[in-house]
Image (spheres, helix red, strand yellow):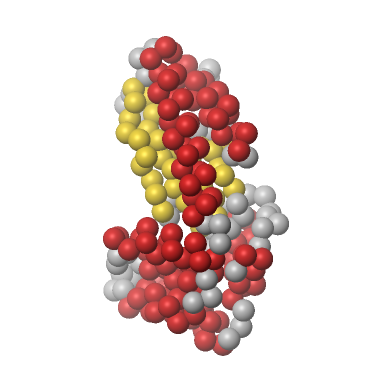
Amino acid sequence: MSTPPHSKIINRVARQVLKPIGVKRKGQSRIWLDDNGWWITVIEFQPSAWSKGSYLNVGVNFQWYPQEHLSFDIGYREAGFVEYESNEQFEPQAQEFANLAKAKILEIREKLSSPKAVKEYVVSSLQDYRPTLWGEFHQGMSCVIAKEKSEAIAYFNQVLSNPHDTGWAIDLKEFVSKLISLLESGEDATHVLNEIVNKSRELKKLEPTDVQISEIA
């Protein structure tokens, strides 16, 4: 099956704008990944089930929880749907999407450039969405990165006290309980997080990373 014209435009423009800053396409999909080891910025030129065209989604996926799929842990919809009408009409729209994605990628890199910056970015970004289980979890993990043990445990206890009891929530709570025990033991949690990151990447069939949380935390 041949690639539709609008997808060809998206792929070409994204390659021109994103590849020079180290962003790679995920297979033959309309998803691009800015892979930084323990976190990945996901750029999705999302198609519509009804019309030719694209949305633009950009967000961060943290690798500090072992799961098989990519998710938008912070961020998501950056631009609404633009319908393809012609090559001449759609190409500048695709260029605008790619430039917006590039700007967000560079912004996120800066916001996750140090342990203190990680905590500030994650806590502030998720503050308005609490309680969500995942929100408190990511806020707690950012505190682990910043070596704010008591604050991390406080967020994790909020995860445990959340009444949500579906299967994934129970799994998350068990994971968090182990992290609390680890933090309370006084052991350096960042080395354990490196193992978690490697496991999460393996589940997603991503290449192993040389970027270690213990090197920045």
> How far from the left and from the top, in percent, is residue 167?
39, 66
Q: Residue at x 45, y 82 (%)?
A: 150
Above or below, 89 relative to 155: above
Q: Residue at x 40, y 35 (%)?
A: 56
> How far from the left and from the top, in percent, is residue 113?
56, 57
Q: Residue at x 62, y 34 (%)?
A: 20
Above or below, 64 relative to 160: above
Above or below, 103 relative to 132: above
Can you name the residue that lies furthest to the right here?
A: 210
> How far from the left and from the top, in percent, is residue 26?
57, 38
- On the question of residue 16 being in view, the answer is yes
Q: Quadrant of the C terminus?
A: bottom right
Report the label total: 0
Relative to residue 124, is residue 179 drawn left or right?
Answer: right
Q: Residue at x 52, y 25 (%)?
A: 13
Can you name the residue that lies furthest to the bottom here?
A: 185
Q: Nearer the viewer, residue 17 or 33?
A: 17
- On the question of residue 26 being in view, the answer is no
Dividing the picture into quadrants, the one containing residue 139 is bottom left
> How far from the left and from the top, in percent, is residue 23?
59, 39
Q: Nearer the viewer, residue 132 or 112?
A: 112
Relative to residue 157, is residue 129 drawn left or right?
Answer: left
Above or below, 114 relative to 53: below
